Amino acid sequence: MSLTLRDVRVLCDELCGGTDWEGAGHRYAQRHDLYFAGCHAVANWFRQIFLEQTSVAAVRRSKALPLIAQDPMRVPDHLNSGPDLPVNDAVRARFFGES
């Protein structure tokens, strides 16, 4: 729901910024793709840690979960706090217990 409301705001901002509505639609789509990609990446990381049922995933969990138990701030909060948080290799490595 929050992403839908953000989409509405971003599209409205683009449409109200001028009379080139086609350009506004393209600018909105580019902005949407950027912030949605971050949320999608984090959701994929959650799947890899918490849902996958492979031997590789078991090894991944054996590294990550003890560190998360010690420091819950290792878990990215993008799904609750929104897509403006950084999504990069350092965030992923911290979550996966690789740093």
Image (tube, helix red, strand yellow):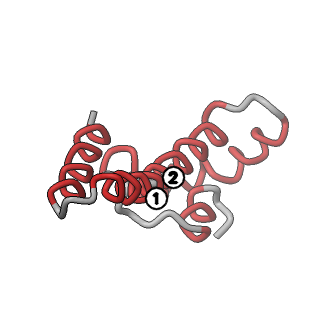
Give the answer, above or below, for where 55 lies relative to 30: above
Which residue is denoted by mark 2 in the rendering? 37
Residue type, numbered disc 2: Ala
Question: Within the image, what quadrant is residue 1 found in?
Answer: top left
Residue sitting at x 76%, y 39%: 58
Relative to residue 36, is residue 13 drawn left or right?
left
Question: Within the image, what quadrant is residue 31 found in?
Answer: bottom left
Q: CA distance from mark 2 to mark 1?
A: 5 Å
Residue sitting at x 48%, y 58%: 74
Which residue is nearer to you in this view: 4 or 83? 4
Residue sitting at x 25%, y 53%: 10
**Mark 2 crowd level (few <14, some 14–19, many ≥20, 10 Å Cα):** few
Residue 5: image location, x then y, percent: 22, 40
Which residue is denoted by mark 1 in the rendering? 34
- The answer to whether mark 2 and mark 1 are in CB contact below 8 A is yes
Residue type, numbered disc 1: Leu
Residue 49: image location, x then y, percent: 64, 42
Relative to residue 12, is residue 66 drawn left or right?
right
Q: What SS does tag 1 mark?
A: helix
Which residue is nearer to you in this view: 77 or 28? 28
Give the answer, above or below, for where 96 lies relative to 7: below
Residue sitting at x 81%, y 32%: 54
Q: What SS does tag 2 mark?
A: helix
